[in-house]
C-alpha cells in the first residue's frame, strides 16, 4: 500500500464509508483501489493512468477522453483532485450532468493540493462540502449534486488567445482548456524557445509534451511541408491541440502517450518544453526517460531543441545521450538547449 499515492492510501483506509454505492472514479492514479471499492467505471484523461487501469482492472468500464462518459451505471463519483482549480470545476460540471440530484461526489487530495479551500469555488450546482476524513497528509471531502445539468459540452470551455508570429500576416490562434499547461495562454519558457527555433523547411517533427500545440503549429505555419506529430499524456491537451490546428488550418498526428513509444519511429527534429511535475510532486522521471530515449527517435543529424528551467539537470542528461549539449540562450529562469544525433 505504501507505493500508492497518499490520497489513494487515505481512500483505502476509509473504504467503509465508500462502499454504499457503485462508484465512478475520476483521475485516479492507482487501479488497486478498485480491489477494495465498488468501482464500476473510471474516467481518465491521463494516458498513463488509463493504461494501468486497463491492464489491471478488466471488469471496470474504461473511459479515456477529454469529456466524461456519455452514461454510467455509477451512483456516486470519487474524484482525485486535479492540481488545477479550473479543471476541478470542469469535472464537477461534467458530473452534475452525468449523475442525478442527490448523488454524492467525493473528492480526495493532498493537503497542499488546494483541497482545503476548493469548496469556496463550488457553484450552486453542488452542495456545500463536508470534511469526511484526514490522514496520509490528505483530506477526503464530500458534496452532492444539487442541480443536474441537461447538457455538457467540453467545447464550451475552450479559451482562445492570439500569438503574433513574425513573417505571418495573421497571429497564431491558440485554443486551450482547463488543465492544459499554461492555460489559457503560453508560458515564458515556450515563448523563449519560439524565439530561437530554426526555420526548418521540411522533415518530420515531434512536439513532445505538446500542450495546446503551440510549438508544432508555429513551425508548421512557417513551413507547411513539415510533418508534425503532437504527443502528450493528456487527452485534454490533445483536444486543445486539435482545436489549435483547426483554427490555423493545419494538419498533424496527435498521439496520447506517457512517453516515447518504440512505435513512434524516427524524426528529423524534436522540440519540447518537457514537464517535471506529476500532479503536485516534482517528478524528474518524465524528463529523465524522455532524454534517455529521445536520441533513439532521431535520424542521423537530427536535432533536439528544448527549453527548461535552469535548475533542472537536463544538460547533463543531454550530454549523456548525445555526447554534447549546446546552450543556445538563457535568462534568469530558463535555458534553451540543442543537441544533434551524430551517430
Image (tube, helix red, strand yellow):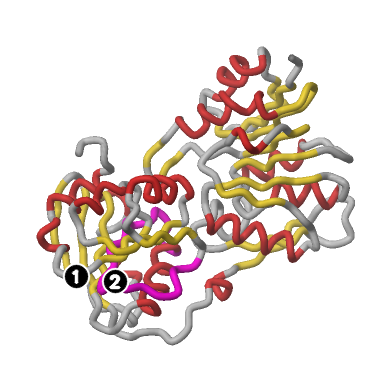
Residue beneath disc 2: 74
The answer to whether the residues at label 2 and label 1 have Cβ atoms under 8 Å apart is yes
Residue at 54% from the left image edge and 38% from the top image edge? 259
Q: Whole-percent x and y of residue 40?
A: 29, 64
- Which mark sits nearer the N-terminus, 2 or 1? 1
Residue at 88% from the left image edge and 47% from the top image edge? 225
97 vs 66: above or below:
below
| Quarter of the figure with residue 328 | top right
Residue at 65% from the left image edge and 66% from the top image edge? 160
Q: Residues within 10 Å of mark 1 (few under 14, many from 20)?
A: some
Q: Residues within 10 Å of mark 2 (few under 14, many from 20)?
A: some
**Magenta-colored stretch includes residue 175:** no
Image quarter in which the N terminus is found? top left
| Cα separation between marks 2 and 1 | 8 Å
Kindly identify which numbered label has been placed on residue 65: none
Q: Whole-percent x and y of residue 66?
A: 51, 63
**Magenta-colored stretch includes residue 76:** yes
Residue beneath disc 1: 21
Left or right: where 108 falls relative to 163: left
Image quarter in which the C terminus is found? top right
Magenta residues, as a range? 67-86
Question: What secondary structure prevails in the magenta region?
Answer: loop
Amino acid at each position: 500500500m505504501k507505493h500508492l499515492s497518499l490520497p489513494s492510501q487515505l481512500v483505502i483506509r476509509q473504504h467503509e464509508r465508500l462502499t454504499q454505492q457503485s462508484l465512478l472514479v475520476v483521475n485516479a492514479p492507482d487501479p488497486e483501489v478498485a480491489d477494495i471499492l465498488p468501482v464500476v467505471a473510471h474516467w481518465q484523461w491521463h494516458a498513463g493512468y488509463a493504461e494501468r487501469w486497463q491492464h489491471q482492472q478488466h471488469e471496470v468500464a474504461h473511459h479515456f477522453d477529454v469529456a466524461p462518459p456519455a452514461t454510467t451505471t455509477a451512483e456516486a463519483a470519487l474524484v482525485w483532485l486535479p492540481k488545477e482549480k479550473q479543471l476541478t470545476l470542469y469535472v464537477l460540471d461534467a458530473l452534475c450532468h452525468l449523475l442525478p440530484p442527490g448523488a454524492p461526489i467525493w473528492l480526495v487530495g493532498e493537503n497542499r493540493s488546494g483541497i482545503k479551500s476548493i469548496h469556496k469555488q463550488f457553484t450552486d450546482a453542488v452542495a456545500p462540502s463536508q470534511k469526511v476524513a484526514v490522514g496520509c497528509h490528505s483530506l477526503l471531502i464530500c458534496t452532492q449534486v444539487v442541480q443536474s445539468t441537461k447538457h455538457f459540452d467540453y467545447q464550451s470551455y475552450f479559451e482562445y488567445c492570439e500569438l503574433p508570429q513574425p513573417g505571418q500576416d495573421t497571429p497564431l490562434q491558440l485554443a486551450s482548456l482547463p488543465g492544459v499547461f499554461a492555460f489559457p495562454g503560453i508560458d515564458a519558457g515556450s515563448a523563449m524557445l519560439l524565439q530561437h527555433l530554426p526555420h526548418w523547411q521540411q522533415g518530420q517533427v515531434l512536439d513532445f509534451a505538446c500542450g495546446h500545440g503551440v510549438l508544432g503549429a508555429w513551425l508548421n505555419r512557417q513551413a507547411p511541408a513539415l510533418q508534425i506529430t503532437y504527443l502528450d499524456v493528456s487527452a485534454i491537451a490533445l483536444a486543445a491541440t486539435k482545436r489549435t490546428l483547426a483554427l490555423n488550418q493545419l494538419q498533424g498526428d496527435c498521439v496520447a502517450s506517457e512517453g516515447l513509444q518504440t512505435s513512434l519511429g524516427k524524426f528529423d527534429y524534436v522540440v519540447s518544453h518537457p514537464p517535471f511535475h506529476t500532479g503536485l510532486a516534482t517528478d524528474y522521471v518524465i524528463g529523465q526517460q524522455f532524454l534517455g530515449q529521445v536520441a533513439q527517435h532521431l535520424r542521423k543529424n537530427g536535432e533536439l531543441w528544448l527549453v527548461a528551467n535552469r535548475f533542472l539537470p537536463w544538460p547533463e542528461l543531454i550530454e549523456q545521450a548525445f555526447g554534447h549539449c549546446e546552450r543556445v540562450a538563457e535568462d534568469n529562469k530558463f535555458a534553451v538547449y540543442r543537441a544533434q544525433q551524430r551517430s
